[in-house]
Image (cartoon, rainbow, N blue to C red):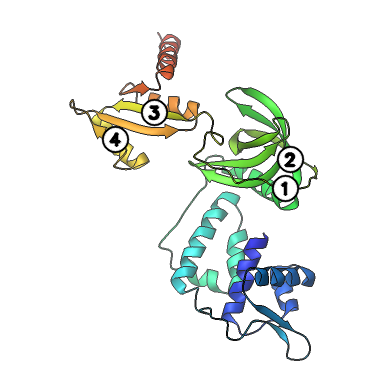
């Protein structure tokens, strides 16, 4: 990714007085022309990087520019590496660990023995999910259309989209894209996507970033109120924190939260084995009752 490379180049320049375009091109496995464009991008960002030709020349940050060359301390590098490891846990590769090695050779091995934080974003769907993430990441970088079969509560459909962003939210991965069938931006849950195919190139449009709290991003959000047996306090605290509920005069837990997924909401309430009563939204109370009757009928001996 270009942003990854820019950060890496800046780190190299902060820790070395001078380097050369061929050396950077070799380190980051790109062309000298790409490195020159990256240097121009750093200059546009307000960091005065100069390139001098001839013997003894090279690329360096302009003398007198006030920037702390020890900006990335050992603790900072550990925090960065912890975050990069979390991305590797999803992709199933060492791509981001390799990036750390390019930024500062030997640092990933040095810091790997001092692991105080581990973030693992892997899921039960890791095998299939990592392939989707890698494929979609490539289509976003190259501005390629992607087509897929999509499963949703409203039925199945075939979609062709212009991909713009991978989003990790509420323990799930989504693709933020312009849907050509709906002629509008949409979030697609990666777990519901199947038979992905890369299509032709497209010209990127001015695409706003998703507001994950808006009804536009998740139009079917539910404001939920549930009365739960207090013996499940441990679970509420574990999943949503100690401030997610109030105690009723009877001693029950009155839980309140927002759910973006109807199926997740229903299955979550049912997982309390009858010790949770959905108070709001009222339209889903009857649905839960029907599900309960169906389960009772199916398991009647």
The residue at 72%/29% (across/down) is: 158
Please indicate whether residue 166 sits to the left or right of residue 295 in the image.
right
Residue 146, numbered circle: 2
Q: Is residue 40 above or below residue 293?
A: below
Q: CA distance from mark 2 to mark 4?
A: 42 Å
Quarter of the image for residue 23 reads bottom right
Q: Position of residue 260 (x, y in %)?
A: 49, 33
Judged left or right of residue 100, residue 163 is right
Residue 133 in sight here: yes
* CA separation in Å, label 2 and label 3: 35 Å
Q: Is residue 19 above or below residue 118?
A: below
The answer to whether one can see residue 271 in this image is no
From mark 2 to mark 1, how far is it between C-alphas? 7 Å
Q: Label 3 crowding class (10 Å Cα cut-off): few <14, some 14-19, many 20+?
A: some
Res 207 label: none
- Front tag of 1 and 4: 4
């Amino acid at each position: 990714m270009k942003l990854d490379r820019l950060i890496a180049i800046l780190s190299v320049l902060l820790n070395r007085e001078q380097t050369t375009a061929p050396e950077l091109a070799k380190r980051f496995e790109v062309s000298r022309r790409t490195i020159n464009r990256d240097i121009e991008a750093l200059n546009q960002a307000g960091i005065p990087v100069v390139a001098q030709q001839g013997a003894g020349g090279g690329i360096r940050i302009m003398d007198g520019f006030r920037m702390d060359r020890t900006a990335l301390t050992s603790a900072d590098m550990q925090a960065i590496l912890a975050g990069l490891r979390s991305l590797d846990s999803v992709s199933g590769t060492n791509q981001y660990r390799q990036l750390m090695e390019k930024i500062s050779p030997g640092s990933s091995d040095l810091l790997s023995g001092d692991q105080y934080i581990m973030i693992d974003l892997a899921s039960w769907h890791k095998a299939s999910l990592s392939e989707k993430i890698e494929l979609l990441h490539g289509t976003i970088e190259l501005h390629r259309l992607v087509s897929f079969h999509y499963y949703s509560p409203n039925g199945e459909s075939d979609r062709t989209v212009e991909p713009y962003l991978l989003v990790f939210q509420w323990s799930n991965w989504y693709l933020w894209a312009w849907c050509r069938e709906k002629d509008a931006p949409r979030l697609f849950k990666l777990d519901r996507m199947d038979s992905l195919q890369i299509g032709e190139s497209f010209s990127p449009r001015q695409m706003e970033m998703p507001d994950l709290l808006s009804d536009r991003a998740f139009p079917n959000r539910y404001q939920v109120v549930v009365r739960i047996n207090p013996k499940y306090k441990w679970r509420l605290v574990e999943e949503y924190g100690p401030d997610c509920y109030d105690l009723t005069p009877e001693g029950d837990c009155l839980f309140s939260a927002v759910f973006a997924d109807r199926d997740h909401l229903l299955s979550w309430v049912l997982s309390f084995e009858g010790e949770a009563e959905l108070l709001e939204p009222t339209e889903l109370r009857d649905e839960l009752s029907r599900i309960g009757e169906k389960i009772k009928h199916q398991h009647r001996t």
